[in-house]
Amino acid sequence: MSVKPSIDPPASSGDGDVRKPFVGPEDLGSFDASKSLGEPGAFPYARGPHRTMYTSRLWTMRQFAGFGSAEDTNERFKYLLANGQHGLSTAFDLPTLMGRDSDDPLALGEVGRCGVAVASLADMRRLFDGIDLGSVSTSMTINAPAAILLAFYIAVAEEQGVASDKLRGTLQNDILKEFHAQNEYVFPPGPSVQLVVDTIEYCTKHLPQWNTVSVSGYHIREAGANAAEELAFTLADGMAYVQHSIDRGLDVDAFAPRLSFFFDVHNDFFEEIAKLRAARRIWAHTMRDRFGAKNERSWLLRMHCQTAGVTLTEQQPMNNVVRVAYQAMAGVLGGTQSLHTNSMDETLALPSEQAAKLALRTQQVLACETNVTQTVDPLAGSYFVEKMTNEIEAKAYAIIDQIDAMGGVLQAVDRGFFRRRIAESAHATQRSIDAGDTEIVGVNAFVDEEASGGVDILQITQQTEDMQTARLKELKATREKARHATSLDRLRQDAEDGANVMPALIEAAKAGATVGEMMETMKSVFGSYDGGPEW
Amino acid sequence: MVTAAPEKSNKQEPSGAPNASRILLAKIGLDGHDRGVKVLARSFRDAGIEVIYTGLWQTCEATMFAALQEDVDVIGVSLLSAAHMTVMPELLRLREELGLTHVPLVLGGIVPKADYPKLIDMGIAAVFNPGSSVDNIITTISELTKKRRLIVATDDVVQRFADGDARALAQVITAIQCDAPIEGWSPPKGSANVVGITGAPGVGKSSFIGKLGATLRSRGRRVAVVAIDPSSPITGGALLGDRLRMMRGTPDDAFFIRSLSTAGTSGGLAPHCADVVRAMSGFGFDDILVETVGAGQADVLVAKLVDRTLLLLMPESGDSIQFSKAGIMEIADGFVLNKCDLPGADATEAQLRGALSDDRTVWKVSAVRDLGIDAVADWVAAS
Ligand SMILES: Nc1nc2c(ncn2[C@@H]2O[C@H](COP(=O)(O)OP(=O)(O)OP(=O)(O)O)[C@@H](O)[C@H]2O)c(=O)[nH]1
Ligand SMILES: [Mg+2]
């Protein structure tokens, strides 16, 4: 093992700012704690969305995982419910995420791999078989076809005799970050956002307890954005959903309380804490002052956090456990409402059972043993943390202004603004690592020759694909042809007319239409999008 | 002949090298993680390499067809979906079938250590993981391109060209580009209909050409595209990204796309562009569509090369005014108002018609929604 004679502390943070070794009151200028921070649980919520935070209720430890078939996942759900858990978290496989049926040629080798395959109402029925949808809360990580999966869920509930206003859960449903970063889009940006607004409008009327969009910075950061960009892009996306919903004629206070956020927690400990605090402050001001929201619940930003997958290294994989622990603590000191900690082997493959358990234990140690939970927002008033919070807030506002000047998020997407910024930041980070300016233990510092390959990797068996294909064949042969065709015609017509497509989707779901068929029908009206080559 | 004379490439000054090595970077399947591949693409460009990126969601077949048409020195595949043990053998099979065994295939992605030897044994030239340093990757790739350049291409290129082998056309284009034409041979005279497509950056030229080409193909016409992107003035490398918007659907020998860089020249065209078009015409294409870099006034040059020119505009871009200053308005034979799915199309159309003193055609189209393309195809085909 090569050990450097001494460790030089890094002189700058990731985005090139040089950090001052000493920070004092003079760095805070006209800082007024009562205005900038307020009380915990009060405007502008810098100190947290709730008055008592973790002293009365811990964050939710939400570990997200996927299993091959609907039956496997259903079994797992029942096990979790029997053990006292009330929230179900659903991960879908890649074909479902892309709005393609399991028998689509591009789905080859992907069916049921990283999540459950749901191609029709029958699959959704199997997924929730024997589970009372009136008494659980279900979160679904799905974007481009989110409206369709929601339609399936509503239809299953109806079959169970559960009224839609009893349904509780969350859709990720954040299509904008797909255009910036994760690339799981199907339709062009404009119609995609209108589809999100359709779900917001429908839920506001019929599923008042449903969290409609989880506006996500996680994927933006993972794709290479720096902290300020993650913050700004995510909040700008949130503002776009709000603006488009208002343009649809919705009352801001009717839908805004059901928006939530999802951030990444990266390596730069204090910067991440500052980012989460600044996020709440910017959102509170924006909702109140820009969109005129009157309801306090509209001002308040609730968030889920996940540790940064991109920081995990294949070299010396055990080191990842330590990274995850520090990141988790940053999330908690930043005041998150729920947290996912990554498994140390996620760069290699899907997490093994042992690694997944260790990831959960990391949160439990943090919650039970470190006592960081016993004081609300313990860092408030630190010269350094408040300065950083102010700085990242200012940077984010500057980027948001830039986006507004382009005419808004959709126009900025069209110009490749987000992709270009992200690609530039990713490239800069890589150069800095290659030059040794950014040190990563095990990669370009303290390199250990034979340190890789020490973990067991979960091997995935490939068996759901045939079953899914057979089921789709059967469905297509047995469903009522006329009703199926009529329902898709209606969907096409509603899409053409610019009507809310949710009722048509629910009807098509009941008529046995598949995810792929509904997506194709909408594509014929909305068009499809093949992304940008922006580097 | 076709083997871009290795000692010549050594003599090249760093900028404007018309025979920079070319790498195809591809993502295959539904996995959308493209941070790694994009970081690499930039680094390759900065190292003086021409990068052809084919975007997301490609099939194995489309990737190999692209490698053939682009006549690349190396094929790089990025896979983060853990599907490498299914995808790589399929690519190797296709590589053999298309006669491209001399082009090294490399893989980057999440690959368990145990699979490395298996992949190397089956014929993959190199495997990189997310922790590989960019410098190492560039060194390896450069070595591989050198090796490839030393392999003398088969000498039956002239015969294969005559037989209609698209690979021969691809190699002839490389030879023309490298200023190393095949001695004593020139392509037969063709009668293709050559149309230049110009317009400001991002107006949708590539997307439009993709749809126009597909429409012409569906009428049984043989279509070739020359897609030009700028090279880096400092390193001579380039990111060639037009192709990814054009290659949706099943690959097809009679839809031939070639990406070229400006290789340090100004004017929005690639060096020897006229010879490339001549070779394509001689190969037997009916329509040749030439996309310029969208540099504005310099694109006037394109008009000299082609039979007719289409100028692309988009709603509310203000570009029409810009272009009228630049003189391209006079040269264009027709105007295509793209992105008419966006607001403001009618206003821009009115503004444009107001600026024209004659009856040149203005088409309203949407490339992403495939609207209005047929009418332009009629015009192109009716030469
Ligand atoms: N809304 C809409 N967007 C389009 C349309 N055509 C292209 N675009 C988008 O416009 C952007 C640029 O498209 P390209 O086809 O790459 O444009 P280009 O003119 O070839 O760009 P350069 O080669 O970089 O100059 C992409 O994001 C396309 O998806 C259209 O008809 N409507
Ligand atoms: Mg282009």
Image (spheres, rainbow, N blue to C red):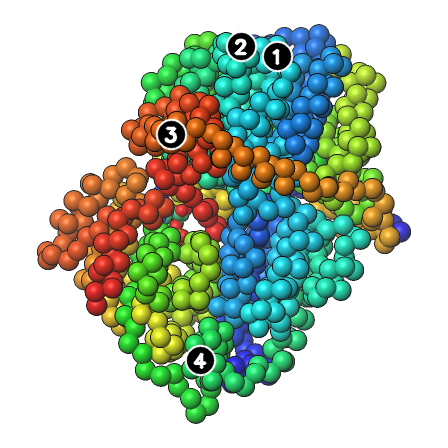
**Label 1 and label 3 in one chain:** yes
Q: Is residue A434 left or right of residue A456?
A: left
* Mark toward the viewer: 3 or 2: 3
Residue type (three-letter) at the residue carrying disc 2: Val
Q: What residue type is labelled 3?
A: Ala
Q: Is mark 3 on a helix, strand or loop?
A: helix
Label 1 to label 2, Cα distance in Å? 8 Å
Res A162 label: 2
Q: In the rendering, at what x and y percent does residue A10 appear? A: 73, 43
Q: In this view, does A436 lie above or below A378?
A: below
- Residue placed at 68% from the left, 47% from the top? B82
Q: Which of marks 3 and 4 is in front?
A: 3
Q: Element type at marker 4?
A: loop
In front: A532, or A388?
Answer: A532
Report the residue marked by disc 1: A132
Q: Is residue A189 left or right of residue B314?
A: right
Label 1, label 3: how many angstroms apart (C-alpha)? 32 Å
Label 1: element kind: loop
Identify the disc placed on residue B163.
4
Q: Is residue A63 above or below residue A252?
A: below
Q: In this view, does B147 lie to the left or right of B61?
A: right
Discs 3 and 2 share one subunit: yes
Q: Do the residues labelled 1 and 2 touch (CB within 8 Å)?
A: yes
Q: Kindly indicate whether the residues beneath marks 1 and 2 are on one polypeptide chain.
A: yes
Q: Residue furthest bottom?
A: B184
